[in-house]
Image (tube, rainbow, N blue to C red):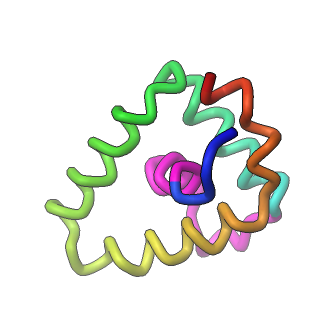
Amino acid sequence: MMSVSELAQVLFTSALQASEDPTPEQVRVAIEGRLRSCHADLADCAACVAQEAGDHPETYATRMRWALSMAGRVDPAAFALAAA
């Protein structure tokens, strides 16, 4: 099972935006889509997060807080197979 922190990293790298005021279902779909596109490689997502933090430090903290908040609204058990 993936942790909320791992889910947030995956969500952070997705195209979903806070301004869309996404539902938990939209968050789940965005995470699933991103996991598929990176072949469930969490290191790839972590690298993208690090790149964004370096490229856009002024927006990194706000987006990560949003991603953590939204990741906390989805059931991590739904992603158990994706992390395996």
Q: Nearer the viewer, residue 18 or 31?
A: 31
Rendered-image quadrant of the C terminus: top right
Q: Nearer the viewer, residue 49 or 23?
A: 49
Q: Position of residue 36 (x, y in %)?
A: 59, 24
- Going by the image, does 54 lie left or right of 7? left
Up the image or down, 30 lies above or below 84; here it is below
Q: Based on the picture, tell me whether residue 3 belongs to the magenta stretch.
A: no
Up the image or down, 32 lies above or below 59; here it is above
Q: Quadrant of residue 62?
A: bottom left
Rendered-image quadrant of the N terminus: top right
Q: Position of residue 75 (x, y in %)?
A: 81, 53
- Going by the image, does 44 lie left or right of 70? left
- Going by the image, does 41 lie left or right of 31? left
Q: Position of residue 78 (x, y in %)?
A: 81, 40
* Residue occupying the far left of the picture: 54
Q: Say which residue appears at 21% left-offset and 51% top-offset.
A: 51
Q: Position of residue 67 (x, y in %)?
A: 55, 66
Q: Quadrant of residue 35?
A: top right
Q: Say which residue appears at 15% left-offset and 61% top-offset.
A: 54
What is the magenta range? Answer: 6-23
Q: Nearer the viewer, residue 18 or 1?
A: 1
Q: Say which residue appears at 35% left-offset and 34% top-offset.
A: 43
- Going by the image, does 56 lie left or right of 16? left
Number of marks present in the image shown:
0
Q: Say which residue appears at 32% left-offset and 76% top-offset.
A: 59
